[in-house]
Image (cartoon, rainbow, N blue to C red):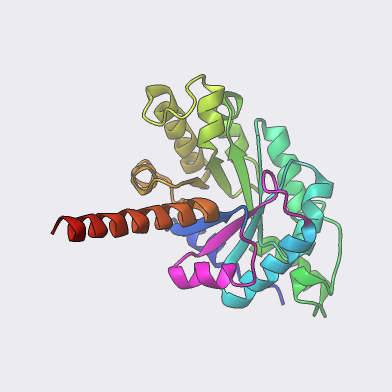
Amino acid sequence: MIPENTVRRTVEAGDTVHGVMAFEFFTPGLPASLAAAGAEYVILDMEHSGAGIETIKAQCALARGVGIVPLVRVPGIAYHLIAPVLDAGAMGIMAPMVETAAQAAELADACRYRPEGRRGLAFRVAHDSYATTDIAETMRAANDAVLVIALIESAAGIDNAFDILATPGIDVGWLGHYDLTDSLGIPGRFDHADFLAAADRLAAACGAAGKTAGIMDGDATLVAAMHARGYRMLGLGSDVGLLQAGYRSGLERVRAAIGRAERG
């Protein structure tokens, strides 16, 4: 009763997937609205949003119900932060500030059952749709379905990118571009040569290991440019950013139309 992770299958094939990150609007209609708009996954944030496990569990159930893959960014690389989220129904984990192969191995081990990891056993809960009958098969299916994302967002992480992405069990190397530029001393300078060199190094590390590079930003032009640099797991903005951008754009059009009418 473990659903297929279509996002993992897509990135394993080298194809592109699109999604959104959610920080604020954890309503019953959020996953269905995102799916209707074409998102293939949603990353539910626990690092910066203040969202708790009850909220995350509900959103994972809603997302799985409408065919959008729920992924969760946990606040750190620690077993007790990861295991409950997986049991709550998350189909993938993103962990921040992965800077070494040892940290990557700790992350991967927490996300999968033995022999691939050390995840603790819990069945007939949300992750297996409350319906396990064959424990060994459920463990195998869960290991096959989970997507493990290492968030690379520091100069140290970029320096160690090839070792991090070569770690068994890591599926995606995600570029945390804001923190990375801060670490490089060029905050927000996504056109800077040092940032672009770092982004290319992460893409190369992913390619060498047969893994996928990912990034998310509210600027569609930046996201498309990173696709051209080899990034295949793409995110376009957050729930807050998309609402603000959509309203701002519409408001500007309304004001412009009013101005034209008043002048005419």
Residue drawn where x is 54% and y is 29% of the image:
180
Q: Quadrant of the N terminus?
A: bottom right
The stretch in magenta equals 25-52
Provide residue 179's location: percent of width, then percent of height.
56, 31
Residue drawn where x is 82% and y is 80% of the image:
133
Provide residue 52's location: percent of width, then percent of height.
77, 55
Residue drawn where x is 65% and y is 35% of the image:
97
The single residue placed furthest to the top in the displayed view is: 185
- In this rendering, the count of numbered labels is 0
**From this viewpoint, is residue 3 visible?**
no
Q: Is residue 45 magenta?
A: yes
Q: Quadrant of the C terminus?
A: bottom left
Residue drawn where x is 60% and y is 33% of the image:
163
Provide residue 153's location: percent of width, then percent of height.
58, 33
147 with respect to 196 (left or right): right
Compared with 159, 213 (above or below) is: below
For the residue pair 257 and 69, the one nearer the viewer reads as 257
36 with respect to 77 (left or right): left
For the residue pair 158 and 141, the one nearer the viewer reads as 158
Quarter of the rendering containing residue 174: top right
Compared with 172, 39 (above or below) is: below
Provide residue 78's location: percent of width, then percent of height.
79, 42
The single residue placed furthest to the left in the displayed view is: 264
228 with respect to 129 (left or right): left
250 with respect to 138 (left or right): left
For the residue pair 189 and 243, the one nearer the viewer reads as 243
For the residue pair 54 and 25, the one nearer the viewer reads as 25
**From this viewpoint, is residue 218 visible?**
yes
Q: Is residue 83 magenta?
A: no
